[in-house]
């Protein structure tokens, strides 16, 4: 090669390197890529749309619409100039840099100011999404493209904090993989879509074993944020109940929680799920007793463990325990649901002195907890003077007629049980009616309900009964929670919906403690024994119907079976995946380590390793094996890519021989290892490689593989300046 030719090659190499450096700040994509980025940003943000502040939502929509219009105009101009549908063009400069900076600063300040309302978690989510929206205005280099795709993946996966059903999780996983398609299409724009999809699926499959191992063994840390306890976010029961509140809640088909018993399921009439005890009544509204902050309040909230109950709680444990698992849906409240009398060994669950369980925090995610209940336990065999006074207090201003009747009954019946039975008999024998559409009461008057309208829902009867008991001198309180549950035979668990919300009463009797009394059972026994009665079901269907009602579809047998199967799959996902908490992980790892120490699980562990090896062998066997010449070509391309990473770049106009000579001239330390690879590739291109015997071809392949490893090692040493 002449000296002039060698100088020309060096000059071309310098020019090519300069262009590559300049190209880092001049990214050009085709219209498919730009519109793909816009579509994926829309889909990524939609996963969190329910969590967004209205102001940011408007900004995100405006940014996407502006980007779409600008890119559509740029695409039409580029296509008209080149008459090509795959024209590459740089991202148009939509906003000046100083405006983007002002938006970034003002948006960050606004999010910080709104943090008091949003809370730490939602503030971080808004900051992440705000950066994602702004980044779309700055795609000038490959680095910006990487950052935009990574931000989109983080935004999509952040939605799993709030919604964790299996179907939503699958949708998010598909969306995350689709985001990676942007990068695959960028590096291989001519590759067909099915081939790109196959490559993406293959890479995803390789990551599954690692993900499973990390899920099982990686420590599960509690989040350091807290979702704000805003009123608009709360669902389900409230800590205060007025007449008619639960009747409105009974129209909701929203899931409240699911329950799986270890043994047989109890009867429907035994499924009273206690949530809260309302013992403060002002004549209109029932509320939880609000104690002043201090030492007394600390005593109200103790541990729910069985050992604490036996030592500190006024409960006489009797009979065998009923063990079950509850999976509560996010309610943004703190109370939990359990049968009486409930205990739990989980440290994040506490118990009030009214025997209701609560979560030490806000239930902002699906929560799984284990409970053991003792139905035969005696609650408060000895009632304190303070509790007695609290549960006898009542207002005489709103319901004077009911107060007079209770006092009359007290004179008539000296025994508490006889008085209770008389009131229940009146509900059963007189013209009282159980309905979801009770007549409106003036100022929620119990007098008007009991003596005039005589039509109401469970809270009407429970509130009236509790008031009469207090007026008659019997300590009483109202309890709200849920009654019953719908059995899913596909998963053998109960689903309790908001429409199962219920209210009942508790009265305190000497030697018997707190006893549950449900006046609804006297008025509508079907409600307690089987759920909604036929009349109440028809009324519910009528009230729930509308222009887009699905009542006719829900009545179809195939729809019910399909819904049960879908719910069963989601339940198992929630139970085993979402319910895999840090405490359960600790138990699993402790059991695994103990089993390994005892030698019991060695056989299973070996079987697992064999299964993994067989799976790996199967995957490798189904792959089409490359021919030796294809592998030589692949090694040559890998060597070129490796040299390019160390600023030794082959320009397109160079032949393989010219580039080999260039490496020999400029980097003689690398030539010894690169030359065999280049020589074999040249022979592959210009000679009949197939004429060689199989032994010769394998020998040649082994030689260039060794040369490639040495080249990689030499480049790594050069990078570290090791001679």
Image: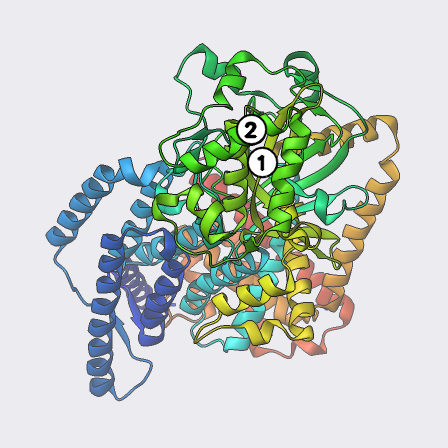
Q: Would you say 92 lies left or right of 537 here?
A: left
Q: Name the outermost residue toward the bottom.
A: 83
Residue drawn 12% across the image and 53% down it: 99
Query: Which x, y percent locates residue 581?
Result: 61, 37
Q: Which mark is residue 561?
A: none
Coloring scheme used:
rainbow
Q: Which image quadrant for residue 123?
A: top left
Identify the residue under disc 2: 476
Q: Which image quadrant for residue 230?
A: top left
Query: Which x, y percent locates residue 641?
Result: 46, 58
Q: Nearer the viewer, residue 299 or 608?
A: 299
Residue drawn 65% across the image and 26% down it: 416
481 in relation to 705, above or below: above
Q: Is residue 572 among the parts visible in the rendering?
A: no
Q: Which mark is residue 505?
A: 1
56 in relation to 325, above or below: below
| Disc 2 from disc 1: Cα separation | 7 Å
Q: Nearer the viewer, residue 137 or 532?
A: 532
Query: Which x, y percent locates residue 351?
Result: 58, 25
């Amino acid at each position: 090669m002449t000296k002039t030719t060698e100088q020309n090659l060096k000059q071309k190499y310098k020019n090519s390197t300069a262009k590559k450096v300049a190209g880092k700040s001049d990214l050009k994509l085709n219209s498919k890529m730009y519109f793909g980025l816009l579509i994926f940003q829309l889909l990524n943000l939609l996963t969190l749309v329910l969590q967004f502040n209205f102001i940011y939502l408007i900004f995100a929509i405006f940014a996407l619409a502006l980007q779409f219009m600008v890119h559509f105009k740029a695409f039409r101009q580029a296509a008209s100039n080149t008459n090509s549908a795959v024209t590459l063009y740089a991202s148009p400069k939509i906003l000046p840099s100083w405006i983007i900076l002002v938006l970034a600063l003002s948006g960050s300040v606004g999010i910080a100011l709104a943090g008091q309302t949003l809370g730490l978690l939602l503030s971080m989510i808004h900051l992440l999404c705000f950066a994602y929206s702004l980044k779309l205005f700055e795609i000038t280099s490959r680095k910006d493209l990487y950052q935009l795709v990574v931000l989109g993946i983080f935004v999509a996966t952040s939605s799993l904090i709030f919604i964790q059903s299996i179907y939503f999780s699958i949708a998010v996983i598909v969306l995350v993989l689709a985001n990676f398609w942007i990068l695959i299409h960028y590096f291989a724009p001519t590759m067909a879509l099915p081939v790109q999809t196959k490559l993406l699926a293959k890479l995803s499959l390789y990551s599954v074993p690692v993900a499973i191992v990390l899920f099982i063994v990686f420590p599960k840390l509690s989040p350091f944020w807290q979702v704000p306890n805003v009123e608009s976010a709360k669902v389900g029961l409230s800590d205060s109940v007025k007449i008619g509140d639960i009747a409105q809640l009974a129209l909701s088909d929203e899931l409240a929680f699911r329950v799986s018993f270890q043994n047989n399921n109890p009867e429907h009439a035994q499924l009273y799920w206690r949530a809260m005890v309302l013992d403060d009544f002002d004549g209109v509204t029932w509320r939880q007793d609000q104690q002043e902050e201090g030492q007394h309040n600390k005593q109200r909230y103790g541990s729910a463990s069985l050992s604490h109950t036996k030592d500190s709680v006024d409960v006489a444990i009797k009979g065998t325990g009923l063990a079950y698992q509850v999976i509560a849906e996010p309610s943004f409240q703190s109370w939990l649901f359990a049968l009486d009398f409930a205990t739990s060994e989980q440290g994040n669950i506490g118990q009030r002195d009214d025997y209701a369980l609560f979560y030490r925090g806000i239930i902002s995610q699906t929560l799984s907890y284990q409970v053991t209940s003792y139905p035969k336990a005696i609650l408060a065999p000895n009632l304190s003077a303070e509790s007695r006074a609290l549960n006898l207090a009542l207002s005489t201003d709103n319901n004077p007629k009911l107060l007079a009747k209770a006092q009359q009954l007290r004179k008539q019946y000296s025994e508490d049980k006889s008085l209770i039975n008389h009131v229940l008999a009146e509900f059963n024998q007189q013209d009282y009616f159980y309905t979801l559409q009770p007549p409106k009461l003036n100022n929620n008057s119990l007098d008007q309900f009991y003596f005039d309208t005589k039509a109401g829902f469970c809270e009407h009867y429970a509130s009236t009964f509790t008031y009469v008991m207090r007026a008659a001198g019997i300590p009483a309180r109202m309890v709200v929670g849920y009654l019953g549950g719908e059995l899913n035979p596909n998963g053998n668990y109960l689903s309790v919906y908001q429409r199962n919300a219920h209210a009942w009463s508790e009265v305190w009797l000497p030697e018997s403690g707190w006893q549950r009394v449900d006046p609804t059972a006297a008025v509508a026994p079907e409600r307690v024994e089987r759920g909604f009665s036929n009349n109440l079901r028809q009324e519910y269907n009528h009230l729930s119907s509308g222009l887009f009602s699905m009542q006719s579809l829900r009545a179809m047998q195939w729809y019910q079976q399909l819904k049960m199967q879908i719910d069963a799959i989601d339940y198992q996902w929630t139970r085993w995946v979402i319910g895999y908490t840090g405490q359960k992980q600790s138990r699993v790892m402790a059991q695994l380590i103990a089993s390994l120490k005892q030698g019991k699980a060695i056989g299973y562990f070996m079987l697992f390793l064999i299964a993994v090896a067989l799976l790996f062998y199967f995957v490798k066997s189904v792959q089409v094996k490359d021919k030796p010449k294809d592998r030589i070509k692949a090694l040559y391309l890998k060597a070129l890519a490796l040299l390019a990473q160390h600023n030794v770049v082959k320009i397109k106009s160079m032949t393989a021989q010219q580039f080999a000579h260039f490496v020999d001239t400029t980097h003689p330390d690398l030539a010894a290892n690169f030359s065999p690879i280049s020589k074999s590739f040249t022979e592959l291109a210009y000679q009949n490689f197939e004429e060689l015997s199989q032994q010769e071809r394998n020998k040649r392949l082994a030689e260039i593989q060794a040369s490639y490893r040495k080249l990689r090692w030499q480049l790594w040493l050069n990078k570290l300046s090791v001679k």
